[in-house]
Amino acid sequence: MSGAVLILGATSAIARGSAAAFARRGRALYLAGRDLEELRRDAADLAIRYGVEVRFGAFDAEATEHHATFLERVGAEMGELAGVLVAFGYLGDQGKAAADFAETEAIINRNFVGAVSILNLCAARMEQGGSGFIAGIASVAGDRGRQSNYTYGAAKGAFALYLQGLRNRLFPAGVRVLTVKPGFVDTGMTFGMPGLFLVATPAAVGERIARAAERGRDVLYVPWFWRYIMLIITHIPERIFKRLKL
Amino acid sequence: MKTLSKEIAGWGRYPVQRCELERPERHAELTARSASVIARGQGRSYGDAALNEGGRIVLTERINRFAAFDTTQGIISAEAGVTLAELLAVSVPRGWFPSVTPGTQYVSLGGCIAADVHGKNHHHDGAFSRSVREFELVSADGKRLRCSPRENADAFWATVGGMGLTGIVGDVEMQLRSIDSAYINARHTAAKDLEQAFRFLQDAEHDARYTVAWIDLTSRGAALGRSVVMAGDHAAADALPRRLRTAPLLLKPRGVRDVPFDMPGWLLNPLTIRAFNALYYRVAGRKRAPFVTDYQTFFYPLDALGNWNRLYGRRGFLQYQCVVPTVTALAALQQLLEALAASGHPAFLGVLKRLGEEGAGQLSFPMAGYTLAMDLPMTGPALLKLLEELDAIVLRHGGRVYLAKDARLAAPSFRAMYPRLEAWWPIKQALDPDGVFSSSLSRRLSIGGVA
């Protein structure tokens, strides 16, 4: 396949699973993130396993002033981009966020502002190219506000709304936009959580993401049954929902 | 780092113990975060080597990135959580094969080092450690030590076979063997009794780079120890049948069937085991002419059946593997088989193999002699008593039991079997003065209580 895929926030477990799935399809990759040593390891691993070209570089979602130069560098190194995956995010601590605005700001900036900043630039590039995909990892937490993580949920929900609008805007240009809403995935974030059931592996989730992105799908719940879990959750009347401890 | 308290077991599913698990996602996160820690890769050691009751276990399954692969020299380096299955997927299509492989590919490189595993070619090529050029050892204070036979050699030799007790292996660089195809030229020879099996394992005519004997542990009397000797070596591409010659390094992916749940405990009983063994002896022994098979079938026959340990039911099973020195091996093995027969205890899978010279790893299992491995359904105290009798026979002949398979050896027997423990212990103390790296196995064997 021609054209590289840019993976932003490439060291997360889901990003690693997705990168492997794109590489299996023959895609060259550019891995971006903050932990350069880990990116170096991931890049070497993917190149050896799948025999594709893999490059990497520093990217900080919050440093929006550097996003334009970053994307130019990626373009210079990789040429035309076939796709972009936004995989970075920050769960944060809801209790802390309620008391400390710096935490709230970090959650909003990393999950929403930073994502919008880099995707605005990617969208402009890809719109001219007239093909490709943009995929963003939002969250089922963005489907309904809950006391346990509503700041994170609000930022992810806003990101999902942004992707929806972007999908609408880029459709005539032939660029597809995918919104990914993962439920529980077996990552460091969920490891050891009590009461987890039917947890998906990052490799399986990554495979689903790559397939959906390459096929130009719109919205992907993964694992799939989360679509129905969220359907139920979003249909509970607010009168009742506000009394629940979720 | 988040932890998970869980009841886990080794591959034999005995014993089951509650341990506190953590699972780092990045190489940089490898360190000891508790007063008692042991690393666990794929959990394929059979007993309690990768258990730590009441203590911490570091799962290395996510620390599995390849770092470099020199395809002209066959040198590969990777993080220690990489499995041999992953390595084979990368190396075989490029014409390289692990120099030493155990009987399953679902083991981590770190585990291969910790147990200093051996393969069917031990009598020619030595144990796994011989193919290891260097590795990184993460100590309890997070320091990273490069170890090779030249650099930090003490730490290198104490770690190979050291059952994870010197630290956590971070990454590994190893030398692979050049292959021309993914296929093996193999040959089976039936041996009517133990003595003939021994003769076949010794003489060059029946030997190959890879030689092992499947032994019928249910045979009695004159047929005691009847075996099928299986020998093979990597096939040259131009010697393959025409249909395989176009892509000699590529195998079609093999379907893996899973044992979906625990089989009832009575499934493997003396009757079914005896019937299976008799059938296998006839069928496998009949393949007298050389034949071509793929490396998956030759090296990893049991990997085709996922979770085959469930065949033994909830009580699990023990694998007893011992080695006895060459001079008295025949007599020792005869006594072992007779003791097994006299006990009436069912033994399913038996493997007999000649081993080459002992390596420099102080706790490494192999020594020049013959090794016998057998799978025994766990039946409780009667089995444990039988295995103590077998220990006594092994000890009398100067042999030892393989720790990677063990779940029940007594501490005094262990000390008598591993005399080089005295040389190992000071190195362990220098590397891990607070004794952080410890496991259920190390406590059972009182490895700390030598001095």
Image (tube, coloured by chain):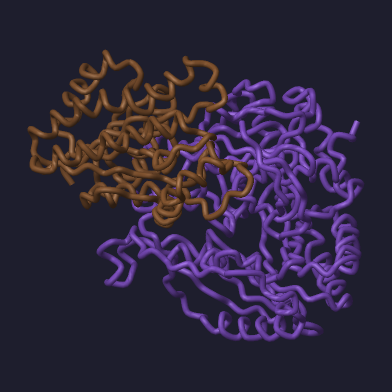
Chain colours: A brown, B purple
Q: Residue B65 or A202: which is nearer the viewer?
A: A202
Locate residue B74, reporting x and y percent.
41, 41
B134 horizontally vs A145: left or right: right
**Residue B24 placement: quadrant:** top right
**Residue at left offset 86%, top offset 66%:** B380
Q: Residue B33 or B80: which is nearer the viewer?
A: B33
Locate residue B321, reporting x and y percent.
74, 59
**Residue at left offset 74%, top offset 75%:** B265
Locate residue B318, reporting x and y percent.
76, 62
**Residue at left offset 74%, top offset 62%:** B319
| Location of residue B214 with respect to B221 vertically, above or below | above
Q: Residue B178 or A38: which is nearer the viewer?
A: A38
Locate residue B33, reporting x and y percent.
68, 28
Which quadrant, please, contains the N terminus of chain B?
Answer: top right
Is residue A97 visible in this depiction of the protein?
yes
Is residue B76 visible in this depiction of the protein?
no
